[in-house]
Amino acid sequence: MMEKQNYIEEKTLPLTINFEELKGMALAYIQKNNDNTWTNLNPSDPGVTILDQLCYAFTELGYCNYFPMKDILTNKNKELEIRNQFYLPEDILTTTPVTINDIRKYVVDQVKEVINLQITPIKEDSNYIEGKYKVEVLIDSRINKNEEAKTSLIKEEKAEGKIITKEQLILNHTFFVLNTCRNLGELFCYPKSLQSKKQRVYGTLELAEDHDLDTVIVAIEFAINNYVFPEILEVGYDKLKKEGKTTDEIFNGPNLKNGWIADETLCPKKNKIQAFELAEVIQKVPGVLSISNVAFNRLGTELEVFSRPEEILTFDFIQCVEKSSNYLDDELEENAEINSLYNFKIYRKDRQLNKSINSNLLQELSNLNQPIEQISKVSTIQMYPELPKGNYRDIESYFSIQNTFPEVYAVGVAGVSDNATDFQKAQSRQLKGYLTLFDQVFTNQFMQLGNLGRLFSFDNSITGDPKDKAQFYSVQTFNEEKYQKYPAPYLCFSPTYFYQSLYKEVPHIKPLLKNIKKHEFTFDVFETEKKKQNAWEEYQYDPYNSYIHGLMLFMEDEHENIKRRNKILNHLLARHGESPEIIDTIIEGNVYSGNTQKDKVIVKSLYLQNLGLLSYYQPKAYNYIGSNFLSTEIITVPEKFQKKYKKLQEKWLQGNQKDFIFRTVEINKTQQIKKPFFTNYSGVELKLNLLFSLPVFYENYLIQNEDSCTYWLYKFRKGLLCIEANLIIESLTNQLDKNENQIDYLEKYKWVIDEFLDNRNCLLFIFPSFFIEENINSTEKNQFKIPDFKKRLSYFLEGELPVQIIYQILYAKGKELEAVIIAYANWHNSLRFDEQTGKLHGPDLVVHTIELMLALLSLTKSKKL
């Protein structure tokens, strides 16, 4: 490999790094505007010397501005800073399964025993359920489906003497996986295994000279069966890229863990196979010279075979070869010539081979020796594109321009001589003060460039001076850090300008800084010299000394800063396909800090931090099989809530600020959305909770109201109940064939079910009524209104929900809310998988479903939703 040759091109440099052009422009400006008071523009003039140093400093800044972005974002550990700055392609381009093909990919990736499946919408359901899918899976033929499964999860069946087979365990696993990717308004039937319809093949095969018969037979059987319903292959990102796939195409679908699946490989199951099709498949197998007279019976007259949708054609080619050599049909015994003609014959060099084979041995070979390209679960494949690798550039470090001046100026490291007069010292300090202003501007610019990642980060920065902040905390003990001597040192709300001190960068800066002598003061005369020695260090570690605190206050006005930060966040939202105007409409009226503009910055920042998961799981419903158990003890046993309430009230009263600074870090942690959340909540619930800042409104309400129902919603359901009418109806219909008593119970409450059938595709949202109560009397502690909550909520839901989903918003309080919560919790718990019995649902599901229906009908004040 040849080394890269470096060379210099003769071309004009850009202005930002062109010293001569910068200096020429500066001199031209001086001549135009100095009114003939500055006539000596030669290098000997001190002013020109200063200009030279400034131009050199500008070129250094310009040079750093040309660093590649990957270098600017590479930290000291040579790692690219990604978190809260960028979403990787596999995180932002993928989505929870939406289409049928997406679901097929996801199931095959998650359930290793399933090699393919078909999912069919049920168009006419006698139980009136819409959005329901029938699922039929093809289990790997190498697995003995009838073998007893080794599991301790299903206890009741074992106690009853029932054997849990591997097939049942695989189907259970598949059903659980399907429900992890269930979307709003969709339901999956319990999956079934495709039933094998075995079929023989007859014909004449010409084998190549250098190929083994056993190997070719195994390859033919695999090729035929893979043609009927091809095994879904998972391949690496790098391979798909080489095939010409774009990144968007590769990541279009669910995020997979074992490899990516191209849409064109998801072939449907073939329910009709013709003889000529199999001939073409066999002809392509290595070692086959030719294939002829292919048929599906010994007479050679059956040239087409069929299977029902719930069946799969299976060609046992190994058995075909074995039987054709050892078996004669009774009806053909008298005509040996015809029988010989339509047996499966194998030739090599025009000689018929002895087909005496060991089918059991070949079957084992078939299980072990699948083609390499079919082995999809490979841990070494490249799943994602490689991240760019940058070089760490210490941009924030600053070298003062005063160090580059000739010694005669007495502003560098050498400073003034020991025998200098007071006048000479004053001259040096006066020039240093003038130059330090330029130094401060330059170092701030380098700091701004070095913190470009913080500036465009999703989360809000907490300091404009991260370097001095880090230095301040590095010398503190654990107790000093926990119990701060100063309130909020170096902290401010989401700065957009960055800066740093010049304590070490500018030589001999100490006499120039304001109020340095106050740290030298002592009442002890004998300690004066020692105090002077420590004063400089104390001054630097004082976050509120006149220099650094004044610099912090001078850098940016908070009002302008918030406007600037809001514009940056709007840019980031737009870059991720989110409309800032729509977000502004939805979050209008949220209260985190009491400042409207600051609250917008807070919510937008939180949304961007969680956008990856919220966008991925946007259409997803909650997983009713695997969700957590919901307890209602704090409602049914008031004493438990009363014990907690006072502590919670004290916590909520502290608000979201500390030392007048918004607690950005703490709020980011409490509002962080994690993957497990989507097991217990739908995507729309979590997004609604975040964008409407529901926790803040709940806390403000609960400070003044000891309301256990409202607290239960706040604590256990993200502030609301989201109920799918389809799922309620399904809770009844999937039990109809299991218990006669349940059927009688359902008949008794048939009128309740009928009320829901007209709204089977409805999504119910239930909130406490305090969200819409009018503030009639400002002195009444129980009543306040969130501005335009109803309008904003409807606007949000209309844009967020799938088009086939209708919704209704209900508000409840008191006993009505309590009844709905208890009925919902019982229904929810009955829907869950029962680990004790191994049943998919609890025994009282039907009763609890009817109770929930009655509670909802009572809430609407009528028998019509």
Image (cartoon, grey):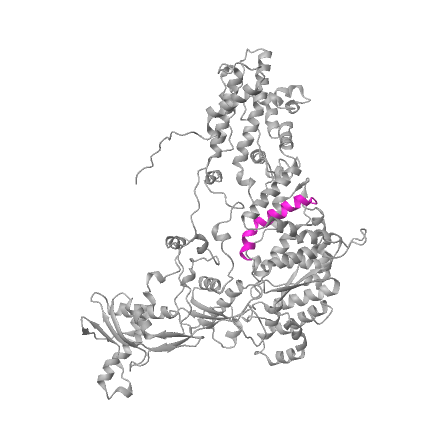
Residue at the image position 54 percent from the left and 28 percent from the top: 442
Vertical side of 710 occupied by 170: above or below:
below
Q: Dividing the picture into quarters, in which one does residue 733 lie?
A: bottom right
Q: Is residue 805 left or right of residue 290?
A: right
User: Which one is in front, 119 or 140?
Assistant: 119
Residue 106: x %, y % from top left: 47, 62
Observer able to see residue 240: yes
Residue 262: x %, y % from top left: 42, 59
Observer able to see residue 503: no
Residue 535: x %, y % from top left: 61, 24
Q: Is residue 252 left or right of residue 421?
A: left
Residue at the image position 45 percent from the left and 40 percent from the top: 78
Q: Is residue 252 left or right of residue 785?
A: left
Vertical side of 215 occupied by 784: above or below:
above
**Residue interval drawn in magenta:** 593-617
Q: Main secondary structure of the magenta part?
A: helix
User: Which one is in front, 302 or 352?
Assistant: 302
User: Which one is in front, 128 or 429?
Assistant: 128
Screen quadrant of the N terminus: top left
Vertical side of 692 occupied by 264: above or below:
below
Residue 489: x %, y % from top left: 63, 35
Magenta residue check for 319: no
